[in-house]
Image: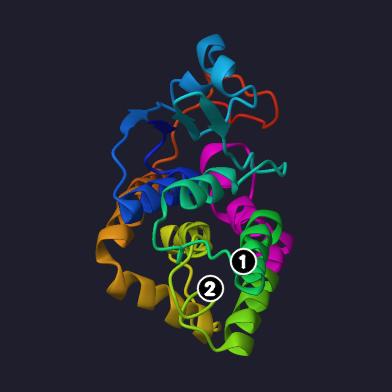
Amino acid sequence: MKLYSISDGPPSIACLQLLKALDIKYELIDMDFGKGEHMTKEYEKLNPQKEIPTLVDNDLIMGESYNFSQIISHNAILQYLADQYDTSGKLYPKEPKLRAIVNHRLCFNLAFYYRNICEYTLMPIFFDYERTPLGLKKMKIALDTFNSYLQRENSEYAAGNTLTIADFPLITATMCLEVIDFKLDAWPYVAKWYDNFKHKHPDLWEIAAEGMRKLAYFEKHPPDLSHMEHPIHPVRKSA
C-alpha cells in the first residue's frame, strides 16, 4: 500500500489518522505541493484530478481530494480502508442506521463544513483570495450547524458515542480554525468534541497537530507559489 500525501493537507491528515488507527503498514510518499509535484504528468496517471492524497492498494488506485472550490470525492479512501481493514467494525459500522449517520457527517463535512472553513482559512494562505465578511458568515453558519448536530445527538463523537471515520475529516477541518487562532467559544459542543478527541486520542491528534504547525507557519509566512501554474485558482503574484 502507498499513500501519496502532504503532511499539512487536511484530507491527507484524515487518511493518515485512519491508517494509524487501523495500524496498517504502508509506504508514505510525501508530495511537495510548493514544487507542484501533484501537477506532473506522472502523478496525473495516478490521479487525473491532480489532487492529493492518492491511495494505491495493490491494483486499486483511489484519488481523494477536496479541490477547495469544487466538490470532489473526499470520503472514498476513508470508506474503503475501514470496510477493507477494520476488523472491529466500529469505525464504519455496517448497521444501516449507524452507517447512515456516519455517511451523513462525511457528506456534511465535504459539501458544507470543510468547504466553508477552508475557503476562509486556507485559501488566502496559498492562493490569491481574501478573507471577507461573507466568508466569515458562511464559516460561522457551518459551525452553527455542526454545533446543533452535536447538541441534538448529545454524542461524544461526531456520529455517536464511538470514534468513527466521520471524526477524522471533521477534526482536520476544525484544525484549520486553530491555524488562524479562531476561537470556538461560541460553539461549546464543537469545542467539547474537539477537545475530547485531543485528550482521548493523543497519537491521532499529533498527526493533525504536526500539520497544523506547518499551516500556522504559512499563515504568518505565506509561501511563494507564483512559479506554479494552477488550472483553477489564481496564484498570488510575488512581490
Label 1 and label 2: CA atoms lie apart by 12 Å
Q: Residue at x 66, y 68 (%)?
A: 96
Callout in the foreground (1, 2): 1
Q: Residue at x 44, y 34 (%)?
A: 223
The answer, for residue 36, to whether it is visible in the render is: no
> Relative to 56, is 180 above or below?
below
Q: Main secondary structure of the magenta part?
A: helix
Residue 103 percent across, percent down from the top left: 64, 62
Q: Residue at x 53, y 45 (%)?
A: 80
The type of residue carrying mark 1 is Arg
Residue 191 percent across, percent down from the top left: 46, 79
To which quarter of the image does residue 228 belong? top right
Q: Which residue is mark 1?
A: 99
Q: Which residue is mark 2?
A: 158
Instruction: Give the residues drawn in magenta, as a range.
Output: 114-139
> Relative to 92, is 196 above or below?
below
Would residue 160 be found to the left or right of residue 208 on screen?
right
Secondary structure of the residue carrying numbered label 1? helix
